[in-house]
Image (cartoon, helix red, strand yellow):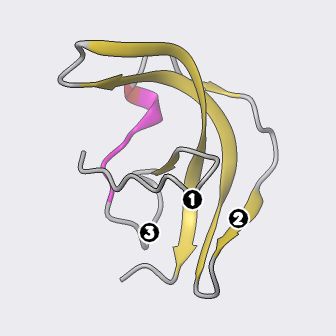
Amino acid sequence: MNLIYDTGSDWLVVESAKCSNCQSNYDPEASDFFVDIGGRNESKVYGSFMRVEGRTVQDQVCLKKREVCIDPFNFFLVTDQSGIP
């Protein structure tokens, strides 16, 4: 999955494969470590044009082809977005 590092953000934001207007292929059902800890949907707004809706979840997050992993890691799972082309 391609990433954009935004050092001004306080969350890792990942688009769900179930998001109809997102481009990601992250499928939480394919993970042995996934836990939905948010319970309810919430929105986050970045700048004046980007809005994401989703919930807080936990999963194993790895970089460099699984060489460096953090488990568990909390992040924001996007189920709907606007403002991203």
Query: Mark number for residue 44?
Result: 2
Is 1 magenta? The answer is no
User: How many callouts does the rendering have?
Assistant: 3
Q: Which residue is mark 3?
A: 20
- Residue at (46% x, 33% y) in the render: 28
Residue 80 at x, y percent in the picture: 57, 67
Residue range in magenta is 24-29
- Residue at (59% x, 55% y) in the render: 9
Label 2's element?
A: strand
> From this viewpoint, which residue is outermost toward the left?
65
Q: 34 or 11: nearer the eye?
A: 11
Label 1's element?
A: strand
Circle 1 packing at 10 Å, graded few (<14), some (14-19), many (20+), is: many
Is 27 magenta? The answer is yes
Circle 3 packing at 10 Å, graded few (<14), some (14-19), many (20+), is: few
- Residue at (35% x, 83% y) in the render: 85
Q: Name which residue type carries label 2.
A: Lys
**Disc 2 versus disc 3: nearer the observer:** 2
Residue 6 at x, y percent in the picture: 46, 56
> From this viewpoint, which residue is outermost toward the right?
40
Query: Mark number for residue 79?
Result: 1
